[in-house]
Amino acid sequence: MSANEWFDSHPVRLWVDEDGDWMAAIEDMPTVSAFGESPSEALRELACAWEGVKESYSKHGDPIPTPAKQHRVMA
């Protein structure tokens, strides 16, 4: 499964922070973020966070946000 499929085509930003941790965030939803010791771990953690966000939207009867346009994972 590609990162675009994991995040329903939302743009994802991946970078190393000042402490050397890998960070991943959904760009159009910056509060949905995660970190890890490697890029793949950060993305896996972000995928878990995204699933939780979608569950919360569904639980409250709100539509799950969709991206404004198609993007790809950016480093």
Image: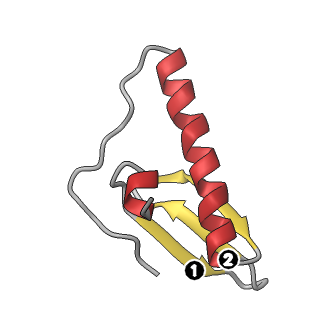
Q: In which quarter of the image is the N terminus?
A: bottom left
The residue under label 2 is: 22
Residue 44, quarter of the rendered image = bottom right
Task: Give residue 48's position: percent from left, percent from top.
Answer: 63, 47
Q: Residue at x 59, y 64 (%)?
A: 43
Q: From this view, report whether residue 32 is shown above or below residue 4.
A: above
Instruction: Give amino acid for label 2.
Output: Trp
Task: Give residue 39's position: percent from left, percent from top.
Answer: 62, 76
Q: From this view, report whether residue 31 is shown above or below residue 27.
A: above
Q: Which residue is drawn at 36% across and 25% down?
A: 63
Q: Residue at x 68, y 81 (%)?
A: 17
The residue under label 1 is: 15
Tell me if label 2 and label 1 are in contact, CB under 8 Å. yes
Task: Give residue 20's position: percent from left, percent from top.
Answer: 75, 85
Front-lying residue, 1 or 31: 1
Secondary structure found at label 1: strand
Q: Residue furthest left?
A: 69
Q: From this view, report whether residue 57 is shown above or below residue 69.
A: above
Q: Which residue lies furthest to the front in this view?
A: 1
Residue 59, quarter of the rendered image = top right
Crowding at dot 1, Cα within 10 Å, few <14 / some 14-19 / many 20+, comes out as some
Crowding at dot 2, Cα within 10 Å, few <14 / some 14-19 / many 20+, comes out as many
CA gap, disc 2 and disc 1: 6 Å
Instruction: Give amino acid for label 1.
Output: Trp
Q: Residue at x 41, y 20 (%)?
A: 62
| Left or right for 55, reference 17 | left
Label located before the other in sequence (2 or 1): 1
